[in-house]
Image: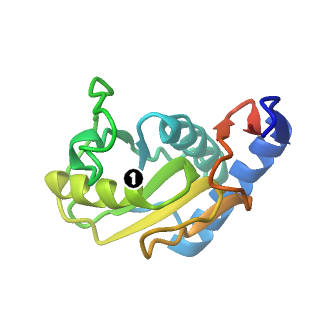
Amino acid sequence: MSTEARVVLNADDVRRALTRIAHEIVERNHGLHGLVLVGLQRGGVWMAQALAEILGGIDGGSTVPVGSLDVSFHRDDVGLRPIVPGHVTDIPMSLDGTTVVLTDDVLFTGRTVRAALEALNEYGRPRAVQLAVMVDRGHRELPIRPDFVGKNLPTSRDEQVAATPEGVTIR
């Protein structure tokens, strides 16, 4: 396995993928009314913030609330990996009756998303929860499917994928 990072998407590609995802969110939800973006700590927060900015430009300057969610204490693999709390959960409002779009940088096994769904219950009962990811790399262990995807990227289990505003790399 090579330790050199291979660039799959550059910063412009990431920006275009985010713009496409934002338009898909507006289309699927018939606008932005009742929409809340919640980024999963750490990788999904930048994505939620970027989407909120793009969405504001699409729908006449509307402001979409953005929150962040740390799922450390809701994971089902607590005994298998260290818990590193300290990332901020900041949900700006009750989620009752809203449509929550969870955002994450990379979707792999689905376990982080499962933990996020459980953690969201502490903040209300959304009308619907949708999932937006920059990269879907497959290898699902749970029946979780994203609603919005920047790039489907088949990988081996041993490869590491990093997605940031600057690009997507595989190592």
Q: Where is residue 160 drawn, in percent x and y?
A: 65, 41
Total residue callouts:
1
User: What colouring does the structure picture have?
Assistant: rainbow
* Residue where numbered disc 1 is placed: 112
Is 87 situated left or right of 110 in this image? Answer: left
Q: Residue furthest top?
A: 86
The residue lying at 30 percent from left, 55 percent from top is 115
Is 92 situated left or right of 3 in this image? Answer: left
Q: Where is residue 132 drawn, in percent x and y?
A: 55, 58
Is 83 situated left or right of 4 in this image? Answer: left
The residue lying at 74 percent from left, 30 percent from top is 166
Point out the image quarter for the C terminus. top right
Point out the image quarter for the N terminus. top right
- Please tell me how crowded label 1 is: few (under 14), some (14-19), or many (20+) other residues with Cα within 10 Å: many
Q: Where is residue 34 drawn, in percent x and y?
A: 37, 61
Image quadrant where residue 51 sits: top right
Residue closest to the eye, 149 or 160: 160
Q: Is residue 35 visible?
A: no
The residue lying at 24 percent from left, 44 percent from top is 79
Is 59 situated left or right of 67 in this image? Answer: right
Q: Where is residue 13 drawn, in percent x and y?
A: 83, 44
Residue closest to the eye, 97 or 154: 154
Image quadrant where residue 78 sits: top left
The residue lying at 61 percent from left, 71 percent from top is 27
Residue type, numbered disc 1: Thr
